[in-house]
Amino acid sequence: MYDVIIIGAGVSSVFLTYELSKLRGDLNLLVIDRGSKLEERTCGTDQGNSCTCEGPCNKYMGFAGLGKSEGKFNYTNDFGGELGRKIGEEKALNLMKHVDDILCSFGADQVKTYSTLNESLQLRAERKGLKVLSTEVRHLGTRLAEEVFQNIYESIEEKVDFRFNTLVETIIPQSDGFKVITEDNTYETKRVVLATGMSGSEWMTEQLDQLGIHHGETRLDLGLRVEMPGNQLASILQHTFETKLQLVYETYSGTTYCMNPRGRIIRKYQHGLVMPDGQNQHEENSPGSNLNFTFFVPEYFHSQHEAMDFARKIIGSINRGKDRVVVQRLEDLIGVKPTQSLEGNKVVPSLMAQPGNIHDEVPECYIQVLMEFLRRLEDLLEEPIDMDSLIYGIDAKFYEPKLVSDVYFQTEVKGLYVAGDCSGETHSLSQAAASGVYLAQVLSKGNDI
């Protein structure tokens, strides 16, 4: 019998497993993941092609999960989840500091941290109706992130049992623990931790229903990605690499996300949908000449099924069964006229997308919130936004429904815990990792394992 079985091998699981194996080397631990080992996680998108994965995309599933993708750790309670609200702000920040120490012990200190804190900008932004969200950032980039997580894996592979490319079919509560039934085996354990992140959302919903665990509303962020001249935000990025700005507007709010000075826009393949995503300048041999970000608008749904249907309806209609992304010049977007061609446009698109009219393909609320944000951004910059800027439709950030769990992340089923994004409490690499460390500390003190 195992002491703990962890289902999922993403970021929260990696830090949970690493920390628990250090704190309690006497425990028998098993990690099961539907995806592959890190070194086997390849996808056509790695070479700039379409996704070639059979089933779930390797960019999102397997050891390290989304940690493999750029490895951007934002150490803050300002955004990225509600871990601080659940366990305490100071404790959450301390856990994130511990996460960073672990990362650095495996090579992450090859890149320095930077801060987006700018008190002068905060005051100026407030006067324009914008809020600046601040964080300490360690941005590893894809290559270093893979190296760091591979180093972590090699440090624990002799202490922990791993089963990759394995689907868990059923979790059955027993009087003394659980049976975990996979497609080719049955395991017994005293404790189970669900750490499946967003990539296992449909599987997670099925398991929760079978176990009778209640799940609440589901958040979904949709937003238009903006690509503008590389120096457009120079006046507010003088002392920091990037910033995160938030607007609360009438019945909607919006926040800039994944800002990439001198970066590029690439296609993101997730849940069978294709979206415009940002890529850091260090991901290619030479930086780009533009700046890009998504302006996300959150919306809440009664169930995850309802949220996914909404996303598929909008994004699927844009994709048209292919990898189509629509793009429009800002001047045309404002004038409500389709963009016919981008030939000779000052802002050269970094993503090959189809020119069109976003008004015909995206709900108006997302356009209006972005327009209001850009108006206030112009006031903050004290200069106009370049009308040759490009607007891409439409990006998405998916979330798990918030689960009922206690302060120790134990669900309504005794002995069944959740960690990371599948708990509904964390939405970022840093907070997911911190929740894993926290749960490891909780489980290590259990007298019955």
Image: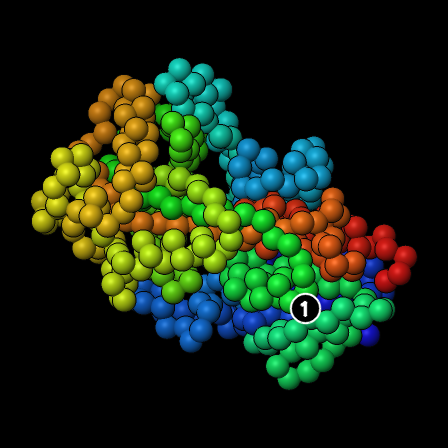
Indicate the secondary structure of the residue bearing disc 1. strand
The reply, left or right, for residue 81 in relation to residue 331 is right
Give x and y (percent) for residue 444. Answer: 82, 55
| Residue at (42, 45) in percent of width and height | 221
Q: How many marks?
A: 1
On the question of residue 273 being in view, the answer is yes
Give x and y (percent) for residue 219. Answer: 49, 46
Observer-nearest of 214 and 117: 214
The reply, left or right, for residue 394 in relation to residue 183 is left
On the question of residue 142 being in view, the answer is no
How are the residues colored?
rainbow
Q: State the quadrant of the N terminus.
A: bottom right
Image height of 78 relative to 13, above or below: above
The reply, left or right, for residue 256 in relation to residue 83 is left
Image height of 146 relative to 357, above or below: below
Q: Residues within 10 Å of mark 1 (few under 14, many from 20)?
A: many
Report which residue position mark 1 lands on.
31
Observer-nearest of 340 and 58: 340
Image height of 187 relative to 410, above or below: below
Asked where in the image residue 331 lies, by quadrant, the reply is: top left
Give x and y (percent) for residue 82. Answer: 60, 40
Q: State the quadrant of the C terminus.
A: bottom right
Give x and y (percent) for residue 65. Answer: 54, 60
| Residue at (40, 57) in percent of width and height | 309
Give amino acid for label 1. Answer: Val
| Residue at (39, 41) in percent of width and height | 296
- In the image, farthest residue toward the right: 447
| Residue at (27, 67) in percent of width and height | 321
Observer-nearest of 207 and 328: 207
The reply, left or right, for residue 102 in relation to residue 272 is right
Observer-nearest of 264 and 401: 401
